[in-house]
Image (cartoon, rainbow, N blue to C red):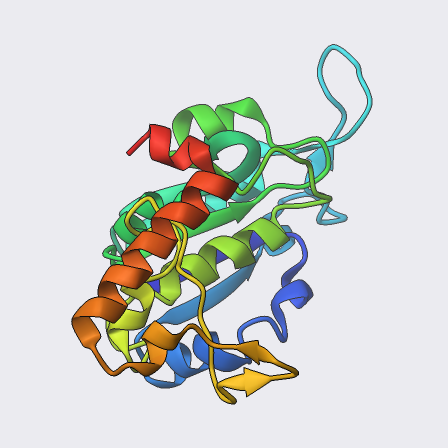
């Protein structure tokens, strides 16, 4: 997979992909991450990429020209499965969406900033708009990292035990069951006996039951959609 990230803050990503699973995915050549500075594509003398809103109002807006030129340049070199804009009013990020995106070959992630981007970019260049939650951040860079991590970890070969990702919360519209590790007893707090039994079928059944209980207690809204 190739991910092209378009941003006015390229240095934000200097260290972001240099750790843990993301780093290994890049080192294994499973994923390519390319960071593009939108300012470099501005035709303005001062390389400005924002301007005042038509009709007045607080906040600056990212302009069309540099974003259009950059996206057009990338599209001339390869076909993109999605051109995604990270925005608070996009569709809410869900696990099913990450599963789908992880199967793609090439995607572009556009980081918004200021008051947002010129609506014509959204109307004519963007193919999908995604929100990571009902709140507003300073820019789309953090949302881009969240989305990238959620996608990359699902790509075959990234996680050594691929079944691990398949048992994460939300994969079956359920939260994950509780997990434990050694020691089996600590300060009198004991691990459930069933997990020490060695009976795989009983353990699997227990985990399914616990996942249902946890979801019903903490996120009943998920079960309503199941």
Q: Residue at x 62, y 44 (%)?
A: 43
Q: Residue furthest left?
A: 201
Q: Residue at x 49, y 41 (%)?
A: 217
Name the foreground residue: 60 vs 51: 60
- The percent position of residue 214, horizontal first and vertical second, equals 45, 49
- The percent position of residue 146, horizontal first and vertical second, equals 53, 56
Q: Residue furthest bottom?
A: 183
In this view of the protein, can residue 73 be seen by the observer?
no
Quadrant in the picture for residue 139: top right
Q: Residue furthest top?
A: 55
Quadrant in the picture for residue 72: top left
- The percent position of residue 96, horizontal first and vertical second, equals 31, 45
Q: Which of the image's four quarters has the N terminus? A: bottom left
In this view of the protein, can residue 148 be seen by the observer?
yes
Q: Which of the image's four quarters has the C terminus? A: top left
Name the foreground residue: 178 vs 116: 178
Q: Residue at x 62, y 54 (%)?
A: 142
Name the foreground residue: 165 vs 17: 165
Q: Is residue 92 left or right of residue 88?
A: left
- The percent position of residue 191, horizontal first and vertical second, equals 47, 76
């Amino acid at each position: 997979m190739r991910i092209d990230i378009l941003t006015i803050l390229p240095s934000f990503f200097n260290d972001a992909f240099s750790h843990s699973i993301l780093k290994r995915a890049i080192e294994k050549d499973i994923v390519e991450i390319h960071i593009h500075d939108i300012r470099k594509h501005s035709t303005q003398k001062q390389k400005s990429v924002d301007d005042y809103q038509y009709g007045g109002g607080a906040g600056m807006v990212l302009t069309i020209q540099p974003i259009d030129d950059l996206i057009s340049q990338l599209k001339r070199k390869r076909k993109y499965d999605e051109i995604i804009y990270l925005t608070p009013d996009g569709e809410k990020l869900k696990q099913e969406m990450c599963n789908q995106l992880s199967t793609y070959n090439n995607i572009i992630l556009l980081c918004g900033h200021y008051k947002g981007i010129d609506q014509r970019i959204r109307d004519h260049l963007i193919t999908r708009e995604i929100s990571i939650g009902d709140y507003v951040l300073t820019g789309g860079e953090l949302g881009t990292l969240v989305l990238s991590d959620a996608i990359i970890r699902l790509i075959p070969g990234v996680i050594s035990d691929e079944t691990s990702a398949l048992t994460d919360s939300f994969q079956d519209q359920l939260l994950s069951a509780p997990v434990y590790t050694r020691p089996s007893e600590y300060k009198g707090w004991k691990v459930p006996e069933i997990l020490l039994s060695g009976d795989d079928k009983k353990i699997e059944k227990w985990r399914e039951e616990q996942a249902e209980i946890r979801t019903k207690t903490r996120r009943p809204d998920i079960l309503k959609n199941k």
